[in-house]
Every structure is written in C-alpha cells, then in structure tokens.
Image (cartoon, rainbow, N blue to C red):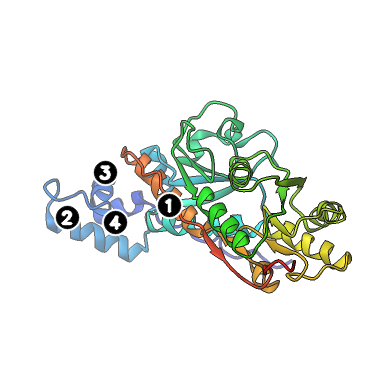
Amino acid sequence: MTPAGPAPASPPTSKDVAAEAGVSQSTVSMVLSGKWPGRVSASTAQTVREAAERLGYRPNPAARNLRLGRTRTILLVIPTLTAPFFAAVYTGAARVANEAGFSLVIFPWPIIPDGPFRVPHEAIDGMLASSMAEDSLAGPRPVPLVMLDSDPEGTAPAVNFDIEGAVRDLTAHLFALGHRRIGHLAAAIDAWTFQRRASALDAAVEDLVRVFAPIAISTGYEAAYELLSRPDRPTALVCDDDTLAVGAHKAASALGLNVPGDLSITGFDDLVLAEALDLTTVHLPAEELGAQAMTALLDLLQGRSPARPVLPAELVVRRSTGRVEL
C-alpha cells in the first residue's frame, strides 16, 4: 500500500497574515481593503502588504460579501433555456453585471415549478425577469426587480422594445407590396409582447386572419398548413417568431406555394435561421435589452431611479417578401 503523502497546505488566512506581520486581524482587514489611511501608519500598512505577499494571501470576496450582507449575485428569470433570444439577453446582462463586479445566474421558470422566489433572498441581490407577466412571479418580492419585454404598466421598472413601431413598419412594407389579405401566425403564449404584437396588427390590418401555435417548427407547419389551405388564403403571413416562420415556409412548400411569388412570409427576432432562410423579419436587439435591464437594476441597487427605455426594433427586409402577383 502506497503511503499517503503530506496533506496539502491550507491557503493562508487573514489570521496568518496578522501573525506574520505582528498586528491584529482588524488591521490586516483595514490595510487590504484600502481603509487604513488615518487609522494606521504607512509603515504598518507596508508591513501588512509584504506579509500578505510572502504568504501568498488572497482575500476571499465571497466571505467579504457575506460580512457586508451582499452576495453580488443577480438572478435572471427566463421562460426557456433553448431559445437563442434569451442567450443574447443573458450575454448583454452578464457583460454589464461583470463590469460592475456582479455574477449573473439563470433561473428557467416555469421549468422549475415553484417559482424564482424559492431561491433564498439572502443568496441574491436582485432579479431580472424576461418576457413574462409580472404577476406570474407569485410570492413576496424580497429583492429589487426589473422586467424585460414585459408590461410597462407594472409596478416594477421595465425595459421594452418598440413593438408598435415594428409592426407599423412591417405592415407598411407589406402594404407597399400590394398585400391586403394578411394572416397572423400567432404564438400561443400568454405574454405581453405577443399580446402587443396582436393588438398592433389588429389596428393596422382590416379583416386579419389569425391562427395560434406553440413556438416550434412542427406546430408552425401545422397551423400554417391549415390557414394556407383555405380558398381565400392570405397572400402574406406575419409570424410572431422566426421559428414559426420556418414552419410556415415548410407548409407553403408542401402546398406547392412559391415564396415570395405566391406567399410572403415574415418573422420576428432575426435569429440566425432567419438569415439562413433569407427571411424578412424584425430585428429585436436582445443583447442590448439585457444590458439596459442590468443597468436599470444596478441603479435600483444604488438607490437611484432607473430609466425605462424603449429600444427600437428594426425591420430587416430579405427575399421572403415580394409584390403580390394579381
């Protein structure tokens, strides 16, 4: 049997530094946190720093945050882990959080059924919640909250897209191409952003035909196939999501319809697959949404009143839309 080697040395502590420097632990804490001027001499501060360097001591930020009652951790609540849109939201929020010395943790809800407030509030300093109703976050609200892509009339600050402006640009584009029979392939999700898209389309288009589908290529295909099989089928189909638009494109192909000669199709989000399919869509700056929301939450944590920006959404015209052939 091979004899065990010596146990690895434990990392040095502030107590070790104090003993090495011949000072108290409180003096070590003051020096290494930069709060020593006017409280200890410059020579003592130098002695403490040299002792810490000799021992290879590094302060433990987690322990320090615990003493201060702060974790410097933010919870990002999203409805799904698989949508590329939320990956971009996370990227923007994490960038701003990291610059401010915060960590960002993702909480998929309602995938985790008990809701985000099952997380002990002592473990987080604040919360971001994207693309869901504020009142769906049931339970007490122990930490500051900022909503993303959600009802601006809620009690929590919200950062949103200009959905109405995007729909106006989209319908104006279709009208300019001669389209009047327009269908709406709507996401079967009870969320503010989809409700706002539907109401903006209702205001812009007379006799709009709408069908609902969960967001997936297969469900988009089924709903679009049913709608496009009607004798008075639409000449243009507005889809709430690029994924639904891909399903609609497949349904058009199965029915022998040429895109855009027989049918124009538009999406929302401007995902990578929209570019691959040459899909006319609405670009939503998801990364900027996350960044702006994190900035608003940092303002809240600092006791400042946060901005409630509305980010512009850009119509991206590609080859899936064309003039009506009468």
1 or 3: tag closer to the N-terminus: 3
Disc 4 from disc 1: Cα separation: 47 Å
Which structural element holds mark 1? helix
- The extreme front residue here reads 326
User: Which numbered disc covers residue 20?
Assistant: 4
Q: Nearer the viewer, mark 4 or mark 2?
A: 2
Q: Which residue is mark 3?
A: 26
4 or 1: tag closer to the N-terminus: 4
Q: Looking at the picture, tell me which residue is in the foreground, 106 or 123.
A: 106
The amino acid sitting under disc 4 is Glu
Q: Looking at the picture, tell me which residue is in the foreground, 266 or 232.
A: 232
Q: Which residue is mark 2?
A: 44
Q: Residues within 10 Å of mark 4 (few under 14, many from 20)?
A: some
Q: Where is residue 304? Give x, y as percent.
A: 31, 39
Discs 3, 4 touching: Cβ within 8 Å: no
3 or 4: tag closer to the N-terminus: 4
- 208 horizontally vs 89: left or right: right
Q: Where is residue 314? Give x, y as percent.
A: 51, 61
Which structural element holds mark 3? helix
The amino acid sitting under disc 2 is Thr
Which structural element holds mark 2? helix
Q: Residues within 10 Å of mark 3 (few under 14, many from 20)?
A: few
Q: Quadrant of the C terminus?
A: bottom right
Q: Where is residue 144? Give x, y as percent.
A: 44, 36
Q: Nearer the viewer, mark 2 or mark 1?
A: 1
Disc 2 from disc 1: Cα separation: 44 Å
Disc 4 from disc 2: Cα separation: 12 Å
Q: Nearer the viewer, mark 1 or mark 3?
A: 1
In this view of the protein, can residue 43 be seen by the observer?
A: yes
